[in-house]
Amino acid sequence: MRVRLLAVGTKMPDWVTRGVEEYRKRLPRDFALELEEIAPGPRGKNADTRRAVAQEAERLRARLRGDEHLVALEVGGKPWSTEQLARQAEGWRLEGRDVALLVGGPDGLDPALSASADQRWSLSPLTLPHPLVRILLAEQLYRAWTLMVGHPYHR
């Protein structure tokens, strides 16, 4: 199973790239994490936010493979503990499909794209910076995998 993190935003600081890579390299080939950056819609003074979010949704949809289990990361999604994430991941693996985790831009995901997802997941009710979300997701996926295989990382 492959897990693709499709995240709106490019040109992350080096510490983000290093953090994500640290957890990516720990994951086995049969639970690989891939990160794909999606260009954000135009923002700035007098920018049309709805249009920017719609453009981001188009770019995200263009990267979907059609047979993936879609998980939209949303503040209003269902919160999972690490143990629940491990159970979700085991379920995804048993489905036999790859997973695409969708992270929107500064104004979130397009509502129609979010509604089309198989699941909606909330990392926290806190507002988290997008660079930190990438590292947090990578670490939690690694932690979930360690639970699935009985590795002592999760204590």
Image (tube, grey):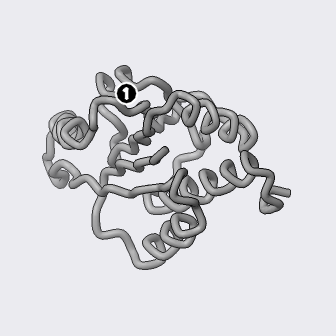
* Residue 66 figure quarter: top left
Camera-side residue of 80 and 124: 80
Q: Residue at x 52, y 64 (%)?
A: 24
- Residue 152 or residue 106, whichever sits in front: 152
Classify residue 138 by image quadrant.
bottom right
Residue 91 position in % (x across, y down): 61, 30
Height in image: 50 above or below 63? above
Q: Which residue is mark 1?
A: 114
Q: Is residue 19 above or below residue 121?
A: below
Q: Residue at x 50, y 66 (%)?
A: 20
Q: Amino acid at mark 1?
A: Ser
46 vs 140, left or right, is left
Q: Is residue 59 left or right of residue 110?
A: left
| Secondary structure beneath label 1 | helix
Q: Position of residue 2 (x, y in %)?
A: 45, 47
- The image shows residue 33 at horizontal and vertical percentages of 47, 55
Question: Residue 54, how many percent across, how many down?
Answer: 19, 34
